[in-house]
Amino acid sequence: AAASDGPDCPGSLIVVSNREPYRHAYEDEPPTDADAETASDTSISVDEPTGGLTAGLDPVMQETSGTWIAWGDGDADFDVTDERNCVAVPPEDEEYTLRRLELSEEAVDSYYYGFSNRVLWPLCHDFPDLIEDRSNDFEWYRTVNEQFTDAVADHATDDSVIWLQDYHLALAPRMIRESVPPGATIAHFWHIPWPSPTTYQHCPAGGHLLEGLLGNDLLSFHVERYADRFLDCVDRFLPGATVDRAQRTVSYDGGTTRVVATSMGVDADSYDRVARSADFEQVSSLFEEYDIPQDTAIGLGLDRLDYTKGIPERLAAIERFFEWNPDWRGEFTFVQKATPSRTNIETYERHGELVRSEVQRINRRFETDAWQPIVYTEDVLPNEALCALYRRADVMVVSPLVDGMNLVAQEYVAASVDGDGTLVLSDRTGAHERLGSHALTIDPTDTDGFAVQLEHALSMPPHERRRRMNTLRQRVFNGDIESWMSTQFDWIRRVHGDPGRKRRR
Ligand code: G6P
């Protein structure tokens, strides 16, 4: 395909993910039947919960007239076109099909809030103490994976490329294998870390998950470390599987799965473009709205409100920084934008309360009449405002305790079009492998060391700042979302030709 069509996919693409690429919501009341024909007017808002993935895959989906299957949790069903709950994308000009699965409340509670986010999320991020293994959650996880499988089977043909996303769907690959034509290729991208065997042993139904994932022809992780740990877990917990370390393949039950590392990037051109057209009026009014003095240096944090993101540790480092550097009081403002997430889970609820109360405490300690050290907001900001903030931020702080990749770090770099921002980056993120050498590295739990790096970031000579950002930008643009997808599709093409595949079924 021509470059403008996106990377060349070796078949008709079926993407399967928990979140839908587009979520439609009514801003006011849903339209009545009488005005249904004008339903595409401004009463409907559309956002992209899968972020970079949607942007990157859109051209490929259109090129292959693909199908995207996802849980339909948006509240709009105005444009359902058939009894299978299929929606045309884009609505006015059907290029591909979005199939939205309806999940019962109980299914969502057990599969999404249960096994996915009370077991697999803490397990993979190495928080075994936070695992809550409630009865029935795994059974529902299996049932919902079956529901996804049935939907895939409705659309799959012998030349389909079935591409699953993330930890919500670990059992589906093997089920899909048994229900689609033998020529179809099954691939899976695992967006979060994979844990060591020491942690994995805490996984309820751990053997079933490994078996499920080995239904794939291709299983990809962001970095080599996660791929290696996956092989370690198979070795240790799945009798009957043969691991070939040199080839990075696993043979199990008559099939072969290749395990690779291909780190994901962002749509760098788009962040660059939006940041270049950033309207500084907008930044000024944002600053006014949040009472940020216009001329202070800006630090920025941008995260889902999740215990893996290291926000309390970051706040502690900021507090230490102001303790040690009183001259910076009134001269540096840290803007923390947080997005509440999975709030039905008590651990998340409590974590949110902790973050908010720490912000208040630190602000009370240092604030003056004209200035607050930390400006905290949970407001939804439009993409233009975000890019403008990225561009304006002198220091971006990305400090997770564990993170599969972290795309925010890359978005910041792509949006730093003036070349003069500094990235402070946790060495426990997948992003650190690519960006660590030119970011300022921190151990997020070392409060003193973290505070020193904040000071270093703010006092760095401009030429050094530019030199670092220049290299970071090259890396982010060279490894953008499009090159990630090309690499995925190259691997898919390769495994399609693997002799091991023919022995399936
Ligand atoms: C992580 C996961 C994604 C997930 C996102 C938002 O990045 O890897 O699969 O979509 O968090 O979480 P949510 O639970 O709101 O989908």
Image (cartoon, grey):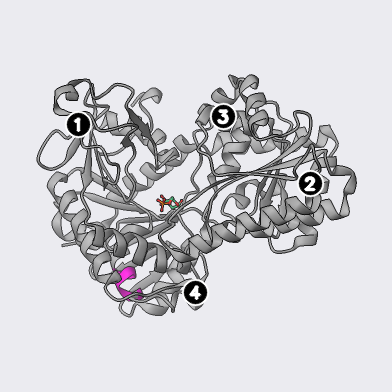
Q: Are marks 3 and 4 in contact (CB under 8 Å)?
A: no
- SS for dot 1: loop
Of marks 2 and 4, the one in the foreground = 2
Give the amino acid at mark 3. Answer: Ala
What residue is rendered at 41% in x and 56% in y? 190
Residue extending furthest toward the front: 369
| Residue 157 falls in image quadrant | top left
- The residue carrying mark 2 is 367
Q: In this view, does 186 lie above or below 48?
A: below
Q: Do the residues labelled 1 and 2 touch (CB within 8 Å)?
A: no
Give the amino acid at mark 4. Answer: Pro
- SS for dot 4: helix
How many dots with numbers? 4
Residue extending furthest toward the right: 327
What residue is rendered at 63% in x and 36% in y? 413
Which segment is the magenta one? 206-211
Foreground of the two, 416 or 59? 416
4 or 1: tag closer to the N-terminus: 1
What separation in Å lies between label 3 and label 4 (alpha carbons)?
A: 37 Å
Measuring from the top left, give residue 158's x and y in whole percent: 15, 46
3 or 4: tag closer to the N-terminus: 4
Give the amino acid at mark 1. Answer: Asp
- SS for dot 3: helix
State yes or no: residue 207 in magenta: yes
What separation in Å lies between label 1 and label 2 (alpha carbons)?
A: 51 Å
Q: Is residue 497 above or below residue 76?
A: below
1 or 3: tag closer to the N-terminus: 1
